Amino acid sequence: MNAMTSSKFDRAALEAMLAVLRPKLHRYAARMAGSVIDGEDIVQETVLKALQALDGGATVERAEQWLFRIAHNAAQDHLRRRQRERSRMTEADMTQIEDPSGSADARLAAAASLRSFMRLSVAQRSAVILVDVLGLSLSETCEVAGATLAATKAALHRGRAELRALAAAPEEVAVRKLNPDDERRLR
């Protein structure tokens, strides 16, 4: 599917490709956002933007990388929006959105499983997800992230090193309280 040209890539081709690629796109988006639900929102935004681009006559040479690039940009936009929202929220707002019905143990387990990964920078998280989780090559990762090969290699190397360091850290050091926004996302 990577070799599809613009003359063959239309709405039908996009729908066929999404039937195969949607799980990988969702996995990438969910891990970038730190939330399965936010990941679904990002995938839906990706599909919408892809359809709009096709309707606008976009030329698509490598469709899979094109879709991942759209997903990457949508994830970055989502993270920026979330950062802006975080800066507007007060602590009183945070207590109003708590889910008291949820189990404290389940929230703690979810926090522990995401905590280390969410501590990576966006570039490191993206590189690790695209290469190690989704199996993209370095060149494909560069194209998706819009980064140079050197920057991608550095982000991948640093992300892997940080994950190893966090995994090797003593339990009481690695398990710290999440900031309120991360805690809200996990709920």
Image: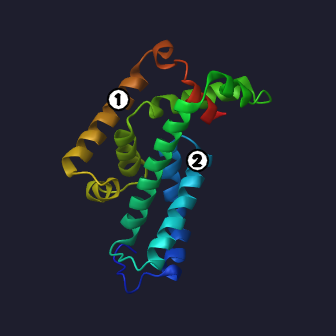
Q: Position of residue 30 (x, y in %)?
A: 53, 47
Residue 126 vs residue 154: left or right? right
Q: Give, as a three-letter code, the residue at label 1.
A: Glu
Residue 38 marker: 2
Q: Cβ–Cβ below 8 Å for labels 2 and 1?
A: no
Scheme of image coloration: rainbow
Q: Nearer the viewer, mark 2 or mark 1?
A: 2
Residue 162 marker: 1
Q: Position of residue 70 (x, y in %)?
A: 42, 61
Instruction: Looking at this view, name the residue that lies furthest to the top.
Output: 172
Label 1 crowd (10 A; few <14 / some 14-19 / many >=20): some
Element on which disc 2 rests: helix
Q: Quadrant of the N terminus?
A: bottom left
Q: Give, as a three-letter code, the residue at label 2.
A: Asp
Q: Quadrant of residue 91?
A: top right
Label 2 crowd (10 A; few <14 / some 14-19 / many >=20): many
Q: Position of residue 97 (x, y in %)?
A: 71, 31
The residue depicted at 37 percent of the width and 79 percent of the height is 4
Residue 96 marker: none
State the separation of the CA atoms marked 2 and 1.
Answer: 24 Å
Residue 128 vs residue 93: left or right? left
Q: Quadrant of the C terminus?
A: top right
Q: Is residue 139 above or below residue 154?
A: below
